[in-house]
Amino acid sequence: MNRDTEAKQRLTRRRLRKGVYVLPSFITCINIYMGFYAVVESVKGYKYIALNDPETATRHFDIAALCIGWSVLCDFLDGRIARLMKATSDFGVQLDSLADVLSFGIAPAVLLYTWGFSGIPAFQKLAWGAAFIHLICCALRLARFNVQASKPLPVETNAKTAKRFFVGLPTPAAAGLLAAIVHFTPLPVVYQETYYRMFGQEFVITPVEWAIGLFALAVTLALLMVSTLRFNSFKDLGPYAQRPQVVLLSLGLLIFFVYNYSEWTLLILAILYAGQGPAGKLAGLFRRKATPTTTPASAETVQ
């Protein structure tokens, strides 16, 4: 009887262990589904632009942007849950990278092309270039991350400091910023014509000018992904943080603002995160210039 009980307990523990390993991969599969859903909705929006139905196209593009946002959340959760449950595996790492290529490479590139550049004939070649640059830099960023993660850290490197930062803008952050912009203003760019007054004169921003700005932003994000700038990983936050009460309070406020003011909240958060790398680099350069250099005393000074 005791042997049967022990055998059942071992079987139960084995099944529970398998379930623990399956959970992060299941969340990654949701990430893949959301990325695919975003591509489908972007294509639908493109179709309704061709049919000159901006209202329906706007609705589909907003859904595509939200799907990419859900993919960002799933990508954040699967790694955290795997590390928390000590269920990390090589299979999960590879599956996560493949999911990121779809959700943060292909899906934003298709959304960028359909929402930002479709219907503007003078911008078609540059539109292809912007979408492809985002996709290829996303793939390069993920390949570099996988190589760096598989190598042991140098002896002189502080492991805690290395884990706190990403080298290059993470692909979810780049895709999230593009999705946040679309969610903030889901009306296709071809229909956007903005009028404003300044110094007593009226100015207009045409769809072509909006597309030029969007192209510059896409190229900038792509270069940030393959750069060597450091971005905070926030891996030190969680149940084992030094001040978990502050983390929980901040998380509650974040959920409140995202639920009630998602357009502004997501856009501001995406801009702040993407801008921290260049801002940190500039701050380091200014600090280096401001620090006085100590020179050895001359003979006259010694006398």
Image (tube, rainbow, N blue to C red):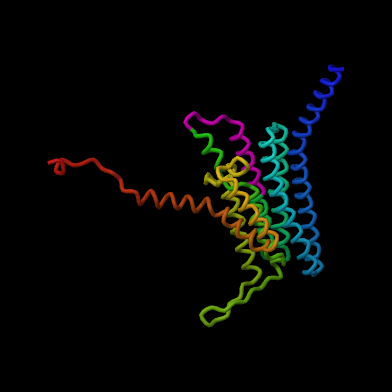
Residue that lies at the very extreme toward the left in this rendered image:
303
Residue at 75% across, 49% down: 35
**Closer to the camera in the image, 80 or 138:** 80
For the record, the magenta segment spans 135-156
- Quarter of image, res 204: bottom right
Where does residue 184 sit, x and y in percent of width and height? Answer: 67, 64
User: Does residue 278 sit above or below 96 in this rendering?
Assistant: below
Where does residue 230 sit, x and y in percent of width and height? Answer: 53, 45
Q: Residue 113 magenta-drawn?
A: no
Magenta-drawn stretch, dominant element (helix, strand or loop) = helix
- Residue 66 seen in the figure: yes
Residue at 60% across, 40% down: 240
Q: Residue 153 magenta-drawn?
A: yes
**Closer to the camera in the image, 298 or 122:** 298
**If the image is split into quadrants, where does the C terminus sit?**
top left
**If the image is split into quadrants, where does the N terminus sit?**
top right
**Closer to the camera in the image, 241 or 199:** 241
Residue that lies at the very extreme toward the bottom in this rendered image:
200
Where does residue 27 sit, x and y in percent of width and height? Answer: 75, 43
User: Does residue 238 sit above or below 159 in this rendering?
Assistant: below
- Residue 116 seen in the figure: no
In this picture, residue 112 sits left or right of residue 197: right
How many numbered badges does the structure rendering display?
0
**Closer to the camera in the image, 30 or 113:** 30
Where does residue 40 sit, x and y in percent of width and height? Answer: 80, 54
In this picture, residue 257 sits left or right of residue 296: right
